[in-house]
Image (cartoon, grey):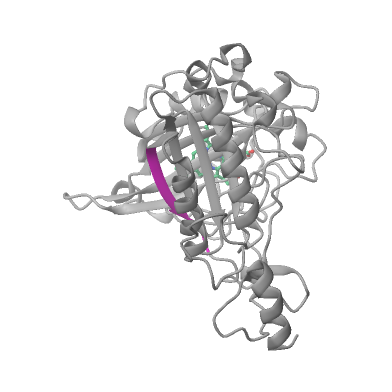
Amino acid sequence: ISRRRLLGTAGATGLVLGAAGGAVGYAAAPAEATPLSSVGEGRAMFHGKHQPGITEGLPARGHLIAFDLAPGAGRKEAAALLRRWSDTARRLMAGEPSADGDTGVAQDAGPSSLTLTFGFGHSFFARTGLEKQRPAALDPLPDFSSDHLDKARSDGDLWVQIGAHDALVAFHALRAVQKDAGSAARVRWQMNGFNRSPGTTTRPMTARNLMGQIDGTRNPKSSESDFDQRIFVPANGAPAWMANGSYVVVRRIRMLLDDWEKLAVKEQEAVVGRRKSDGAPLSGGTETSEMDLEKTDSAGNLVVPINAHARITRPDQNGGAAMLRRPLSYHDGIDPDGVPDAGLLFVCWQADPLRGFVPVQRKLDRGDALTPFLRHEASGLYAVPGGAAENEYVGQRLLE
Ligand code: HEM
């Protein structure tokens, strides 16, 4: 593509065409026809059956932000806000600038697999006079004995998840979402996280968390026949506005890394029931081998300890309870006493939290080997409606 053609295209729309002809980003200053790297080119679709940001792989950078509607703002203002947010999401996910006052922060980059996902918290429905539409699945989560929850960093009327493989692209979207909120909603809390960047391993691998474990091995796979049933509200499910939607549980889980790192690798492996190096079950094989729950050593002890996290959390140990975990690691600096404020922004998706997160967390709360090394510091549960059709905004079926 000649420089001239590029500039001509860019002049009209602000877009540059990549080598493959797809819209990949803003007009960059020296408009050479160099294709963006594969990371920048990655693009998720805004319109679809489900919202983006649920089944995609882990983003290298993520932001979570919750808002409360401003005093006096109700259903009308909420509908206008969701319309603005949807327009921004559609544009930014295509690598275009936001409608007005774009900050320019992402202008040299492609969409970098940016996703924006929107949800409603329990308190949203009373604020907007929509209590009759509030799903029973949004009933507050039970208290867990090991909770140390900060209310100011929990819950919220509205929740937005942003993910991208580039930190500037993700921040750009965060800022746009905040600016769109205008006088309709105020930020309640905001959290930042990260995962390994794409291209850093020689082959695609399951991610590691800040404890160094391979984390995500046994996540439900979209190729499995019961995947949709586990993760999404059916198309004819109730309430109707949640068709093809999902419920997300968000927990800020501090890792007590000083304690964890004192353990020998063998002890760490016994806590989880999997090998640290490759994530294989302690009963043998590779990462994807089936865990043998009955296997004993020569002394007759279970090879995968009875309280190992990966044993306790299995669907077959919890009446089939399953969830899709799509977390971010976080590091918010070091406390004055030298303790790292780091851990996991645990984000998990399910068709019904009472058949996903709740029974499993109840079980963990009664004592698995990992719980002594964790502290749940914040919590949220949100109803994430299905994806917006063309010419529709997210949540329109609830708000109009
Ligand atoms: C599995 C780590 C919190 C539910 C695992 C695995 C690891 C791990 C290393 C094994 C590999 C895998 O299958 O992904 C952690 C860490 C946590 C944490 C570091 C906290 C910081 C939780 C919580 C829940 C949970 C709060 C739910 C209440 C699960 C489930 C599995 C799993 C469902 C897969 C079980 C299976 O299908 O076999 N976790 N986990 N985890 N964890 Fe956690």
On the image, the x and y values in percent for residue 233 come to 72, 27
Left or right, 220 with respect to 97, comes to right
Q: Does the magenta run of residues contain 99?
A: no
Depicted 201 relative to depicted 388: above or below: below
Residue, x 67% and y 54% (percent of image)? 285
Q: Does the magenta run of residues contain 194?
A: yes
Depicted 71 relative to depicted 13: above or below: above
Depicted 77 relative to depicted 268: above or below: above
Q: Which residues are magenta?
A: 188-196
Q: For the view shown, which residue lies furthest in the top direction?
A: 132
Nearer to us in this view, 242 or 371: 242
On the image, the x and y values in percent for residue 169 come to 52, 62
Nearer to us in this view, 368 or 208: 208
Residue 389 shows in the view = yes
Q: Where is the N terminus found, in terms of image quarters?
A: bottom right
Q: Based on the displayed image, in which of its 4 quarters is residue 352 positioned?
A: top right
